Image: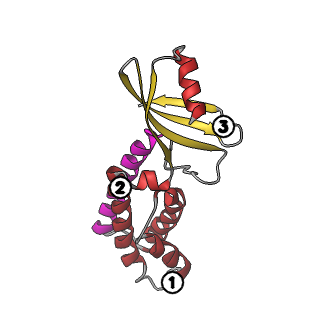
Amino acid sequence: MAEIRYFIMTQTDDFKHYKAIDFEKIDVDFLMAKGDIQKSLTVLQDTTRIKLGFYSRIENASDQLITELSGKVNGLTVDEVDEFQFQNARLNKALADHFDELPKAILSANQKQEIALTELNTSLSAYGLSIYNINLTDGENVFYYHRFQIKNQSYEGIFELNKKTLEVSSFKEI
């Protein structure tokens, strides 16, 4: 990416010693290949499956909510987490409204989900993203992971580029 190379060289005022090592677009495939992200998503799926088991036995359970969440417990992707949280909040409210005291399995599932969401958010924050707003396809910006060297010293960074102008709008060294 010429724009990123130019940005680095102008920021360091060194057009001679820059060496690109790796460029990767940060998209769903990039993030889904990360083990820590996969682990968090698996916990979210497993705990939601537990809560859906309880919810599906409730007499007036919403078929729509069951259908929406059932589709996510087998193949949740990182870009679906923000919507998934909204649906899970609806599930939690429905369970809390039904039970006078939540069963231990639901309480445990809720606790594991909170931990998984915190860990997922920490993982995503390394790439300038958040569990509350993951928009890798429709947004105005695109993100790149880049490894490079300057004077034989290695660096890694996340670059955010405007899709229209391709200007670097932010940089975060990791």
- Residue topped by disc 3: 166
**Amino acid type of disc 3?**
Leu
The span shown in magenta is: 104-127
Residue 90 x, y percent position in the rendering: 52, 66
**Amino acid type of disc 1?**
Asn
Q: Earlier in the sequence, mark 2 or mark 1?
A: 2
**Is the N terminus in the top left, top right, bottom left or bottom right quadrant?**
top right
The image quarter in which residue 19 lies:
top left
Residue 125 x, y percent position in the rendering: 45, 40
Residue at left 53%, top 79%?
62
Q: Earlier in the sequence, mark 2 or mark 3?
A: 2
Residues at marks 2 and 1, CA–CA distance in whole angstroms? 31 Å
Residue at left 39%, top 68%?
48
Q: Is residue 111 visible?
A: no
Mark 2 vs mark 3, foreground winner is 3
Residue 133 x, y percent position in the rendering: 56, 49
Residues at marks 1 and 3, CA–CA distance in whole angstroms? 51 Å
Q: Earlier in the sequence, mark 1 or mark 3?
A: 1
Residues at marks 2 and 3, CA–CA distance in whole angstroms? 32 Å
Secondary element at tag 3 = loop
Residue at left 47%, top 69%?
91
Residue at left 35%, top 55%?
40
- Depth check, front residue: 48 or 59: 48
- Residue topped by disc 2: 40
Colour basis:
secondary structure
Q: Which mark is residue 69?
A: none
Residue 110 lies within the magenta run: yes
Residues at marks 1 and 3 touching, judged by CB atoms closer than 8 Å:
no
- Residue topped by disc 1: 60
Residue 124 lies within the magenta run: yes
